Amino acid sequence: QSAKNLGHPPTPSSHPALEPLRTSSMAIFGFDEVQLCLLVTGAFMGLVALPGVVKPAWHMKKLLPFKLPDPNKDVKTTSQLVLNHYMMSTTRLQTAGLVIAMAYACPGITTIVYLIMFYVATLTLAYPYVFGSSKMDSKKTLVGMDDKAATMLVIVGGVFMAYLAVTLVMNLGSGFATLSMPSEPMAVTIVAVSTLFTVSNLPPIFNPAMALEQYMEKGAMSKDKYAIAKYGMYMRFNGNGWVFLNGGTLLAVLQTTDETFPIIGALFVVYNL
């Protein structure tokens, strides 16, 4: 880090984010255990999200089979819900790609903590829709998730959160990364844009109704209570996804060196084409 302050490019081994690569006692398939954890988690996140990107209508019906509008009678509402499901899945897939990139650009326990926070936030949002009350007007009843499919996703999320937590505990000795701005001019732009989108996407998580009014034209949304509940759920999860995608990008940039920054910089460009 001192070399960076003197204006000389730091070596990868001197950067705190890469410290686990030097201190870890275990290497599997040529990867440090922290790197492997990030790669496995990112790959699995991508596989889980992929069906919702490739076949969003089919995937939505599998996850939310109850109280969906008739696609032949209410094309507009069906299209809106499918679009929201596609957006949610695409954001998850992009986050998976970011995690894999971070495994190479900034593989440290700071990145592990970011992922644990992502899973905690996502599972917290999912709880009322999966395990909440079954009363007539509860979120669980109105959204109409398939219990088996939703419970399986929660269990898998819990397993990966436990995997991340164990990896974190095993590597606490490596220390957390020191966040600093790379010298690349593009880094300033990415930090500014990522900060803006992280902050601006917080409201949809806590007040989806307000966010929907801003995103949707007046009168464009269905008045059906089941559709409205689904709109709100998707807005919460999309807000959560956007916050962690942009927040993760911000965190990644501030952990990179001049040598590893191009990995995150290239991903940012691809995601914003």
Image (cartoon, grey):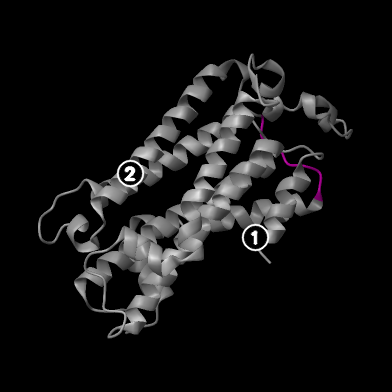
Residue 113 drawn above or below residue 121:
above
Provide the residue designation for mark 1: 271
Q: Can residue 134 be spotted in the picture?
A: yes
Residue 3 drawn above or below residue 197:
above
Specify the amino acid type for callout 1: Tyr
Is residue 102 highlighted in magenta? no
Q: Which residue lies furthest to the right in this view?
A: 8
Q: Residue 152 carries which label?
A: 2
Q: Residues within 10 Å of mark 1 (few under 14, many from 20)?
A: few
Q: Which element is circle 2 on?
A: helix
Q: Which element is circle 1 on?
A: helix
Specify the amino acid type for callout 2: Met
Quadrant where the N terminus is found in the figure: top right
Q: Mark 2 or mark 1: which comes first in sequence? A: 2
Q: Residue furthest left?
A: 135
Tell me: 268 left or right of 212: right
Counting from the top left corner in percent of width and height, residue 217 is at 39, 82
Which mark is in front, 2 or 1? 2
Q: Which residue is drawn at 24% across and 50% down?
A: 147
Q: Can residue 242 be spotted in the picture?
A: no
Q: What span is colored magenta in the figure?
A: 178-184
Counting from the top left corner in percent of width and height, residue 161 is at 43, 33
Q: Which residue is drawn at 34% across and 83% down?
A: 75
Q: Residues within 10 Å of mark 2 (few under 14, many from 20)?
A: few
